[in-house]
Amino acid sequence: MTRTVTITDNETGKQIECPVLEGTYGAAVISTKALYDELGMFTFDPGYATTASCRSAITYLDGEKGILLHRGYPVEQLAEKSTFLEVVYLLIHGELPNKKQMDEWSHSIKMHGMTHEHLSRFYTAYRYDAHPMSIMAGVTSAIASYYYDNTDIKDPENRLLTARRVMGKIPNVASKCYRYASGLPFVYPDNSLNYVENFMYMTFSWPSEDYEPSPVAVRALDLLFILHADHEQNASTSTVRLAGSSEANPFACVAAGITTLWGKSHGGANEAVIRMLEEIGHPGNVKKYIERTKDKGDPSRLMGFGHRVYKNYDPRAKIIREACHDLLEQVDLNQPLFEIAMELERIALEDDYFIERKLYPNVDFYSGLIYQALRIPASMFTVMFALARSAGWVAQWMEFMEDEDFRIGRPRQLYIGPKSRDYVPIEERE
């Protein structure tokens, strides 16, 4: 028997039965498709905090318990045992690859690592000090013009080809964002290297010198990419799906996701954490800074704590915290800032003010320290996030293209403006 919820209009007494849909995990959802047809009403849910916008089999998170699963696999296991490119395969295909599948997948991504040579001129239209996220969004959108007439989004093979193109070209775009801002010549990919090694080579190598990335640095960056790969229906992922609902070019959809991620309340938070730690300056100043964040009249904010969904310790934050400890002696991790971060975390987790509000460290709290240790400037932090999150965006886009409920997105509103009125000529207005 199908479970239903009865909704009653207490003005007219009219009732409707709304089906309750159950997922594998998580809260059940009420299907309100009949609400307007039967009662002439819509739901009101600012920020979509209690609205399920889609069915998805890709990622599940439980904010109360601090659980994050990709296709059923705990992120802790993937972070320990997998690689980013393998996780991308998992997100897109639904299962982990065997050896042959992984080799073919890696090869196919490498074959799409180049971008059209004309695209390199696109970067020079930007000021030398333009924010890399602005450049990344613009260039990614421009790539759509190269795959406009020959991309059939209704064809599964074309969609898979698009996924390979996105994942192959995004590291190339991201590396050029860095090198353009640094005044360095662009570097072509080297297909003898793995995915993360190749990105580091394109980003940090010098034409006059041999470059061999540190295995420790490669593993640290690979880990961060895994932890940022997908995170359910967040703002940027929802934007990619909404753009995709109009059947827009997939590169344009990814560019829309990049633009959304740029916001300081989304992907820009790790950059803000570094600025906060630098402002604090010393572990001895942490208590004073925390008291300032409690003062409503003080603009200071505790960056890197709290999450829209997690009401427990972000599982990704635990993994990155451990990685910071591992990196202390192996790469040039900014130890003074790390010590401030640890002291800030310790005091905040013992403070009733933050405990009552369930403000725990999130993934952004420590990730900036690792990026900084890898010589990645703060302005590039969100670009790194976008590179990794492209995996989730393209997987979510592909899933949505196959959804039986596919239709163009069209949220409703509660209109609170003036009632209908007649136009008055300007000479007659008071």
Image (cartoon, grey):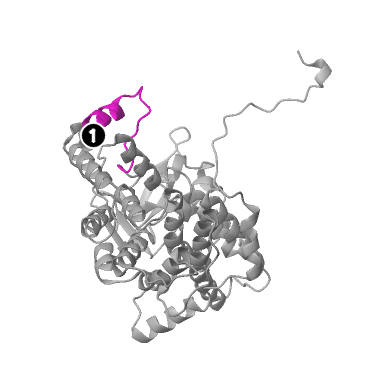
Residue extending furthest left?
A: 350
Judge whether 159 appears above or below 20 on screen: below
**Residue at which label 1 appears:** 286
**Residue 287 covered by magenta stretch:** yes
Residue drawn 66% across and 67% down? 118
The residue closer to the viewer here, 11 or 338, is 338
Which range is magenta? 285-306
Quadrant position of residue 316? bottom left
Q: Is residue 155 above or below residue 329?
A: below
Looking at the image, which residue sits at the far top?
A: 430
Asked if residue 127 shows in the view, the reply is yes
Q: Magenta span has 275?
A: no
Disc 1 secondary structure class: helix
Residue 53 in sight in this render: no
Other-residue count near label 1 (Cα within 10 Å), few / some / many at <14 / 14–19 / ≥20: many
The quadrant the C terminus occupies is top right
Q: Residue furthest bottom?
A: 100
Horizontal arrangement in the rendering, residue 410 relative to residue 283 (left or right): right
Q: Nearer the viewer, residue 203 or 414?
A: 203
Q: Is residue 395 left or right of residue 86?
A: right
Q: Is residue 428 left or right of residue 253?
A: right
Between 353 and 291, the one nearer to me in the picture: 291
Residue 8, x across and y down, in percent: 42, 40
Return the x and y of residue 200 as percentages of the image width and height: 42, 66
What's the residue type where badge 1 is placed?
Val
State how many labels appear.
Answer: 1
Q: Which residue is at 29% across, 27% downward?
A: 292
Horizontal and vertical percent for residue 245?
Answer: 57, 59
Q: Kindly identify the residue that appears in the image at 41 percent across and 43 percent down.
A: 7
Front residue of this view, candidates 412 and 271 = 271
Q: Position of residue 356 (x, y in %)?
A: 22, 35
